[in-house]
Image (tube, grey):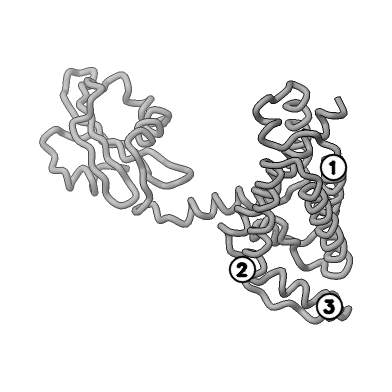
């Protein structure tokens, strides 16, 4: 069991280092001037320079490349020098995070690039300490990461899953990443947003407008489909209970969220522009 735990730390540390590398290289931090005072207390000159250096793009790229190299080395070799370098790196990171929490509570740690822009809290410090402990535990691991992956044991998989869940709970970066994805999705105007027909049909069939007219629709194949601005219009033939043939026009929103569906019953001979502007409510 001890060997399984040690081998698991190698995989965990490699995954963390490679993730940090990708985050630093792919995401740019927002430039910000480092303040001279925090809550009225002067910031030590050395720590201020360290924070400014940490926030620079060149420093982020350099750290990312170094972390990526260590992560790949952990996967490819079990040499003690690689494990020692990893342990020193995480120990140094733990010291930096601790110093930032005490002396620069306004600054993020930059552990995962721009995703780590929020102020350092206890979770970030605890996470850094646990990573350092994992690095110490990995010193005695007999196998490289690739060898562990080639013959994954149930114990290794279980320990790895538990540790990932623990570190995910200690990582505010996940919430930041989710927020960035929502912001990116919402930033695209609805008239320019890509909206496949499968999405339109799913939204339509789940709507109250569809339920209200479903029993009178005469064909599952629409007569016409077109898109105007933030709406996609879908026209179906229908027959009312009295035997009158009509067309039902559904207007389905193409927005990223809170999509709505409107409908109108029109005569078959009604011009398309009338359906579009005058009848869909």
Q: Position of residue 125 (x, y in %)?
A: 84, 54
Q: Which residue is mark 3?
A: 46
Task: Identify the residue shown where x is 37% and y is 43%.
Answer: 253
Q: Which sits earlier in the primary sequence, circle 3 or circle 1? A: 3
Query: Which of 250 and 229 lies nearest the eye of the viewer?
Result: 229
Instruction: Give left or right: position of 198 versus 167.
Output: left
Mark 1 falls on what kind of element?
helix
Q: Are marks 3 and 2 in contact (CB under 8 Å)?
A: no
Residue 215 shows which numbered tag?
none
CA separation in Å, label 1 and label 2? 37 Å
Q: Are marks 3 and 1 in contact (CB under 8 Å)?
A: no
On screen, residue 276 above or below 248: below
On screen, residue 5 above or below 118: above
Q: Which residue is mark 2?
A: 30
Q: Which sits earlier in the primary sequence, circle 1 or circle 2? A: 2
Mark 2 falls on what kind of element?
loop
Badge 1 local density, few (<14 within 10 Å), some, or many (20+)? many
CA separation in Å, label 3 and label 1? 32 Å
């Amino acid at each position: 069991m001890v060997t399984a735990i040690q081998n698991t730390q190698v995989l965990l540390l490699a995954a963390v280092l490679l993730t940090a590398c990708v985050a630093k290289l792919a995401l740019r931090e927002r430039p910000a001037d480092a303040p001279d005072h925090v809550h009225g207390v002067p910031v030590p000159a050395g720590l201020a320079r360290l924070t400014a250096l940490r926030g620079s793009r060149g420093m982020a790229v350099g750290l990312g490349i170094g972390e990526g190299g260590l992560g790949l080395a952990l996967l490819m070799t079990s040499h003690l020098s690689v494990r020692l370098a990893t342990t020193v790196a995480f120990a140094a990171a733990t010291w930096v995070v601790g110093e930032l929490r005490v002396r620069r509570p306004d600054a993020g740690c930059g552990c995962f690039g721009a995703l780590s822009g929020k102020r350092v809290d206890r979770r970030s410090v605890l996470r850094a300490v646990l990573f350092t402990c994992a690095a110490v535990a990995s010193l005695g691991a007999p196998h490289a990461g690739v060898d562990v992956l080639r013959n994954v044991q149930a114990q290794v998989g279980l320990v790895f899953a538990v540790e990932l869940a623990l570190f995910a709970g200690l990582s505010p970066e996940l919430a930041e990443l989710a927020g960035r994805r929502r912001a990116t999705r919402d930033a695209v105007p609805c008239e320019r947003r890509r909206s496949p027909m499968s999405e339109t049909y799913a939204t339509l069939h789940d709507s109250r407008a569809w339920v209200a007219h479903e029993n009178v629709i005469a064909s599952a194949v629409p007569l016409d489909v077109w898109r105007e601005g933030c709406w996609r219009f879908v026209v179906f033939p229908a027959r009312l209970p009295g035997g009158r043939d009509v067309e039902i026009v559904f207007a389905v929103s193409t927005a990223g969220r809170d999509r709505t569906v409107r409908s109108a019953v029109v005569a078959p001979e009604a011009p398309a522009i009338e359906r579009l502007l005058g009848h869909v409510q």
